[in-house]
Image (tube, coloured by chain):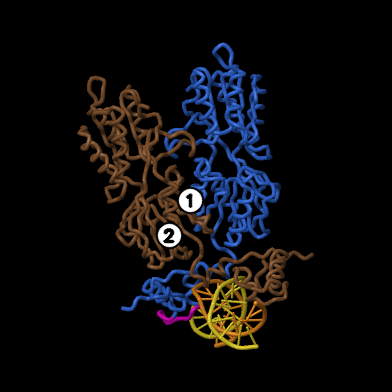
Chain colours: A brown, B blue, C orange, D yellow
Amino acid sequence: MAERKTVPTMKDVAREAGVALGTVSKVVNGLPVGEEYRTRVNEAIIKLDYRINSYAKGLKATRTNTVAVLMPNLINPFFTSLVSAIGRALAAKGCRMLVYETDSDPGMEQANVILAEQQKVDGIICLSYNQNLKVSDGVTLISIDRYFGTRIPCVASDNYGGGMLAAEKLIENGCRHLAFLRIGTKLTNEPIKRKDGFIAACEAAGIEYTLKILDDGAPFSAFGDFLGEHYHDGKLDFDGIFCVTDSMAYLIKKMITEMGLRVPEDVQIVGYDGVQMFGDLDYTCSTIVQPVQAMAETCVDMVLNPDGAKNPSLVCLPVSYAYGGTTKA
Amino acid sequence: MAERKTVPTMKDVAREAGVALGTVSKVVNGLPVGEEYRTRVNEAIIKLDYRINSYAKGLKATRTNTVAVLMPNLINPFFTSLVSAIGRALAAKGCRMLVYETDSDPGMEQANVILAEQQKVDGIICLSYNQNLKVSDGVTLISIDRYFGTRIPCVASDNYGGGMLAAEKLIENGCRHLAFLRIGTKLTNEPIKRKDGFIAACEAAGIEYTLKILDDGAPFSAFGDFLGEHYHDGKLDFDGIFCVTDSMAYLIKKMITEMGLRVPEDVQIVGYDGVQMFGDLDYTCSTIVQPVQAMAETCVDMVLNPDGAKNPSLVCLPVSYAYGGTTKA
DNA sequence: TTGTATGCGTTATCAT
DNA sequence: ATGATAACGCATACAA
């Protein structure tokens, strides 16, 4: 009748079941225990509504079944689709996910790594271009899209192949002069390879191309200037554009439309990421689709791999092309 | 020279600094300690690179500075914007966030609540329509968009006011016959009030209206049938539509366009949520914008409120209207 | 196979 | 103000 003020512990279960503490622990952890004892303990657990205290458990244990995920933000749909897929893959393996938004700020990233380590996470999956990120030896770190060296496994989409595919699709659709548009950090990272693949495909096909690469922080209007320079007699110098992300493709399409040109009739555009409206409706543009689920599963397998030393240092997963209205057919 | 194999503990810091264990604890927790001791301890902490073990801390402490967030998914941009805002609000208060995707499945929801409780979270913020969700007495539960009764605080946008606003804006833009379209659970929840507000505004203005409400799980094509029934001589019976979400507005706009009608010239559409392209670009349609940040901050304030009994049972936060191309002007 | 005892890293309650 | 010590809940090595 009196409200149980205190949460039941193993000791309470042991008393209730009339067995020893250690026996309860074994039942809870699935270790061999006599059949009758097991039933008694399980009944007591249900009766008392006993829940294991993961803090007490984590104090001794080396594993906490918790993984931290560091993302620049949870606004960009590509990032959230990664978080979603990682979360599902972790849940399937009985792991919890701590999510940290870093705003790509090195200070934030480091602070969050420290928070995660205090939480004794089993590992960290991060999307960061921070050169100097320091992680303790004990924690497995998996990087998405940034190669930190052989010691830290990196998971990425096949950016080089994706760049090629984008150029090939545009050429296949009749384009004869392509442009590559990018804005972003100068730091070495995997997405930079999109340009290399693009160039390789253009050269293989003997197609003319133009590059416009802006530093991170440059005003987006610089692309407007660029388009203006290449606009003569009512048409652009190029008839196909590969934008480094879908988000940029969206903005470029808007600019081009405002110039009075039609997409895809006058200019075709291909983006990169595979972002869909409302997450699962139409693609926002014709695009190179990143294999988000495969990437997430790979990250999770590797971060949970007890023998981290055996992890490869770079895994590139295959991309695909999807029509999204900004190319012909 | 030998690699420190074991992580330093408070005991190590105490030995290094030549003080007692308790003193270190006080320094770490900002309790009053003699100036000289404090410096010595801090130096030792830095020298050993000591990090507090939150599992050991959580074992004794009643607070763990961790809050669980249960969302139907991390695909819908409205949900992810909530998670993002909640995460930032929690981080600002020094709290960690555990994220669980439930797929709105009652079993998942309950399982995740249990996981969260094992993790001894300080509270749970959830978006669930589950009638029977059971949460232990000790944990504060805050609900978004679903009123569970006076004991569980609910945070929502002003759904009634938003419904009114949608109708008013359409009428203001010249509409004379409105339609309200909704698909979703029949269970009592706050978003249902969008309809009531809509009706109230229509009646106040003496404007004709039509409702079409589908059960969750009904095929979306039923709306196509509905539109067909109201299509005569190249025009629809109504000239303004309020859709219960932006996602639905997107699909309805597509249907209407495919019928050969123009949006907004022939039919104007208003959605609800305030979803933006790529999270921070254009609105996907003219819409009633939910005050996501205010909602998140309210949830966090309440979930962290030590005196949970003083929390209100329902907080409705004001919405606003945003133009997104599917209305005139 | 089951029970007992010890320790994990921290906080909190004591004396000092 | 500081130092010693007893919990906290569980896992585990060890004794029965």
Q: In the rendered view, would you say B317 is above or below A326? A: below
Q: Position of residue A22 (x, y in %)?
A: 63, 76
Report if the CB atoms under discs 1 and 2 are less than 8 Å apart.
no
Residue at 45% over, 75% down: B9
Outermost residue to the right:
A1
In the structure shown, which secondary structural element does the residue marked by tag 1 occupy?
helix
In the structure shown, which secondary structural element does the residue marked by tag 2 occupy?
helix
Chain under numbered label 2: A
- The range drawn in magenta is B15-21
Q: Quadrant of residue B184?
A: top right
| Residue at mark 2 | A303
- Magenta segment includes B214: no
Q: In the rendered view, would you say C16 is above or below A100? A: below
Q: How many marks?
A: 2
Q: Position of residue B321 (x, y in %)?
A: 53, 31
Q: Nearer the viewer, residue A216 or A249?
A: A249
The amino acid pointed to by label 2 is: Val
| Residue at mark 1 | B88
What distance separates the C-alpha of mark 1 from that of mark 2? 25 Å
